[in-house]
Image: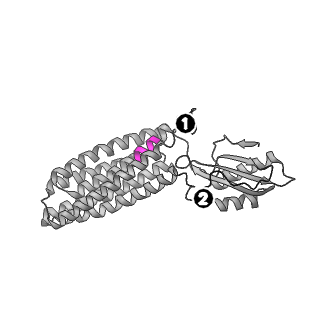
Amino acid sequence: MPNDHNHDHSSGDHHHAPKVRSENEKVVLVAFLLTFSFMLAELIGGLLSGSLALIADAGHMLTDAGALALAWAGFRFGRRKSDDRRTFGYMRFEILAGFVNAVTLILLVGWIAWEAVMRLIAPSPVLAGPMLVIAVLGLVVNIGVYWMLRRGDRDHVNIRGAMVHVLGDLLGSVAAIVAAITIWLTGWTPIDPILSVLLSVIVLRSAWMLLKASMNVLMEGAPNNLVVSDMQQTLVADVPGVEDVQHVHVWSITSGQPVATMEVRLSDSADPAATTAAIKHCLSTTFGIAHATVEIDWEHREDDCVLIPD
């Protein structure tokens, strides 16, 4: 049964996988090194000063470092060519890293929540001075990282995502500063675990979104903005010569790289080559799918797809 396999990866009007630029990779790498290094310093400072808010903010900085690392991995590994064993290349590496990062962060949030409850029940001393110094330094580092990211290609989805993470961490640094000043002036230590829980909620939200997104890709789920039934109806309605579209499978190799396979039934008067090209053009411009395999059902069979369980 003939089929046509599209190897053209050029982007359509709605394709969101911008071209990799070397300056983006450098900016993201330096920003990651700064963020990860200070995250370790903040974690150590939180343990030494007894501040749970600093530890929670270090957890938030870990989400920033993870986002920056994933952006860098996308730039670095996305350039590797496919081979006989990995026919789609190494682009899914960033999805695997994102899944591990999300699970780790959720476990961290659970520990912080438990520790916060224990500290509210039995308050422990907090060294407000060292806590304030570390929190202020964290704010300075976050401002510097944000400024560096603004120098990159702000239209790139990975750069934009990293900037959002860093803005969230700026709030975390401000919260830690507020807690340190409050403890210094009033001695009211419960504000430290209370703010740590608020920071953990921010971390949990980011981690949960990352977990859902990575799980959807790993489970070969369709992109969130695409409804398969709508795509089938659009192809039948907008592409002349297409009578039916069945056995549709849409998934993502990595973020912003959707692919599809399908079987189409053509009218008797349709030109197979021209109709197949029109289908791929519609998939690219309307749904952002630049890599598609379209198979023509010449025999008008009614058999079920072998990938669907009985």
Q: Which mark is residue 181?
A: none
Q: Amino acid at mark 2?
A: Leu
Residue located at (81% from left, 50% from top)? 299
Determine which residue is flagged by label 2: 226
Residue 128 placement (x, y as % from top left): 15, 57
Residue located at (36% from left, 47% from top)? 65
Q: Residue furthest front?
A: 310
- Overall secondary structure of the magenta section: helix
Q: Residue furthest right?
A: 269
Q: Secondary structure at mark 1?
A: loop
Q: Locate residue 224: give its quadrant.
A: bottom right
Is 307 situated above or below 5? below
Residue 73 placement (x, y as % from top left): 45, 41
Residue 219 placement (x, y as % from top left): 52, 52
Q: Amino acid at mark 1?
A: Arg
Q: Nearer the viewer, residue 277 or 264?
A: 264
Determine which residue is flagged by label 1: 86
Q: Is residue 69 magenta?
A: yes
